[in-house]
Image (spheres, rainbow, N blue to C red):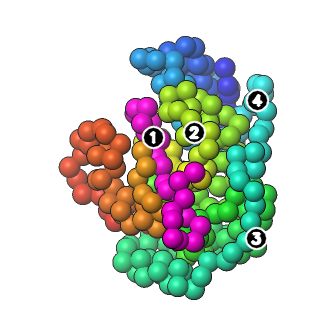
Amino acid sequence: MRRFEFVEGTSKKFWEIDLAGKSFEVRWGRIGTDGQTKKKKFSSTAMAEAEAATLVQQKLKKGYVEIGGKRPRTQKLSELTASPAPYQPPTVSARSDWERLRKRIKILGAGSAKSRPKDKVLAAHEARTGFALPSSYKAYCQTFGGGEFCGYFDVFVPGGSLERFQQEWTSSYREIWAASHGKVCDRLIVFGTTVAGDIMGWDPDDRARGLPVEYAVVILSRSSDRAVRVARTFRECVENVFLKPRRLPKLLGYVDDGDEPLPIDFAPS
């Protein structure tokens, strides 16, 4: 069993998950009480593990901290990546392209300046991981920063949220997802999630030809065992997937029951 707690101000909550084969039980409530419990069963052990990993990820993102328990060995992200290359800052034209896109959509609030990392933060991330970030993503980071597109696609950036997410992926979730989604998980460099719990990342083995550093974007579907290449570059992914969210069900092969139009906006973190 894994236990997580959130203590901030007057809020003192706990959340526990007990994974057992094809099912798990969660218990949650105020610290010091018995709380509530809920059990959930799945068709396979892999699906149960994947769902449990997604729930843990969501709790950590909300600020919960794991209490006790033996954690897997912390694996360095650099163990996943190719040899490092000298840092290349985003070009003026690339940033201008993102600025034009920013003017086309509704921006919900100003966000924090810290969520738009400067060159030294991006360079430090590359040096630490040995992975050259996509050129379009670096320009994106300095224009949009971390945040959520259309209330559905959550993109993390260096300087905090990306490092935490990538560390959790390599140390806790990757092996679980690989059991159902295959070897692509071993090389995937993750950068975000969807509200539904899908994992988004770059495939370093699928580099765009004739362009600066760019990699194909792959989404791992939480509701199936599919790993789908959704775009050739990060910029293309934002334009054709994040800003057209109704396309995602078709790309991932599941039924979209929603008929309400989704807002085309961006909420800075």
> 220 or 12, which lies in front?
220
Residue behind mark 3: 86
Q: Amino acid at mark 4?
A: Arg
Q: Residue furthest left?
A: 259
Q: CA distance from mark 4 to mark 2?
A: 20 Å
Residue behind mark 4: 71
Local SS, label 3: loop
Residue 230 percent coordinates (x, y)? 40, 53
Residue behind mark 1: 227
Q: Amino acid at mark 2?
A: Cys
Q: Is residue 209 left or right of residue 169?
A: left
For the residues bearing labels 4 and 2, Cβ distance under 8 angstroms: no
Local SS, label 4: loop
Q: CA distance from mark 1 to mark 4?
A: 27 Å
Label 2 packing within 10 angstroms: few (<14), some (14-19), many (20+): many
Place residue 253 in its image quadrant. top left
Local SS, label 2: helix
Q: CA distance from mark 3 to mark 4?
A: 34 Å
Q: Residue furthest top?
A: 21
For the residues bearing labels 1 and 2, Cβ distance under 8 angstroms: yes
Q: Is residue 32 left or right of residue 52?
A: right
Residue behind mark 2: 185
Q: Is residue 217 left or right of residue 129?
A: left
Mark 4 vs 2, N-terminal side: 4
Q: Quadrant of the C terminus?
A: bottom right
Label 3 packing within 10 angstroms: few (<14), some (14-19), many (20+): few
Mark 2 vs 3, N-terminal side: 3
